[in-house]
Amino acid sequence: MTAAAAREASAPTERPSVLENYRDDGPLATALGRALGRGVKLPAIALLLVAGLPLLVAIVLTGDGASKGLVAGVIAWVVLVGGIASARPLDGRLAWAAPPALRALEYGGLLWIAAVAGAASLPAAFALLCAITYHHYESVYGLRHRGVTPPAWVNAVALGWDGRLLLGVVLLLAGGLPAGFYFAAGLLAVLFVGETVAEWRRFRLAEQPVYDDEEDDPD
C-alpha cells in the first residue's frame, strides 16, 4: 500500500470540510446537535457567541468568587448551545472562527473552574490544557502533513470539548480538584501522544516501497 493510499484510507468521511475536523465535538455535543440543531438556522459562529456570552459575563463579574451553582449553570449553557452548533455546517466568511471559538470556550471554562476551586487547582488546569492543546495541534498538523485526523475512538475517549467541561464541573462539585485535573492530564497525555506515535509508525511503514521481486519471491 502506498503512502497516498494509506492516507486516503485513514481520512475521515463523516465530515465534509477540514474546519469541521477541528471542532473536537464529543459524543454529547454531537447528540445535542442531532437532536436539537437541525431546525436552527443560525450559523455556527453565531451560536457559539450566544454560548460564550454568559461565560464571559460571569467570569468578568464574579471571577474566582463565583458560586459552584453558577459555574455549573453557565457551563451547562455553554455545552447545550455549543452542542447545538455542532449540527451547523461550517461555511461562509466566518466559518474559520468556529474552531477558535470552541477552543476559547473550553480553555476559558476550564481555567475558570480551576480558579473557583482555589489557587492550588490552577497548575493542574494548565497541565490539563497542555495535553488538550497538544491534541488540537496534532489534529491540525496530522491532517496537514500525513493526511489523517485522530481516530473517532480517540475523540470519544477524550470526551470532546463538551465532555471535558462537564467533567470539570463534576470534579468541582465533588471536591475532586486539583487531583482530578492532574489525573485527567496524565491520562489524556498518554492517549494523545501514544496515538501520535502509533500513527507515525503506520505512516512510515506505508511510505516504504514494495519492489516487484519482493512480491514474487516465494520465500
Image: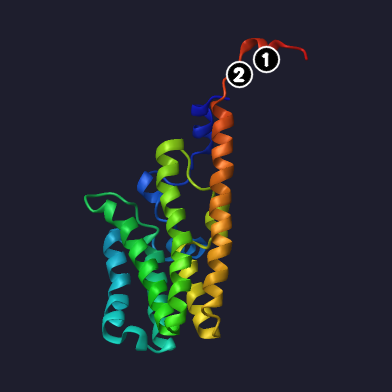
Residue 191, position as x, y percentages in the image: 57, 55
Query: Pointer 1: residues within 10 angstroms few (<14), some, or many (20+)?
Result: few
Is residue 72 placed above or below 196 in the rendered structure?
below
Name the amino acid, label 1: Glu
Looking at the rendered structure, the secondary structure element under dot 1 is: helix
Q: Is residue 42 visible?
A: no
Residue at position x 58%, y 56% in the image: 190
Which numbered disc covers residue 210?
2
Across and down, in percent, residue 130 comes to 45, 61
**CA–CA distance in space, label 2 to label 1:** 7 Å
State the image quarter where residue 123 is shown.
bottom left
Q: Tell me the quarter of the image containing the N terminus.
A: top right
Residue 15, given in percent of the width and then of the height, sits at: 43, 46
In the picture, residue 66 is in which quadrant?
A: bottom left
Q: Residue at x 31, y 62 (%)?
A: 101
> Could you say which is closer to the camera, residue 78 or residue 71?
71
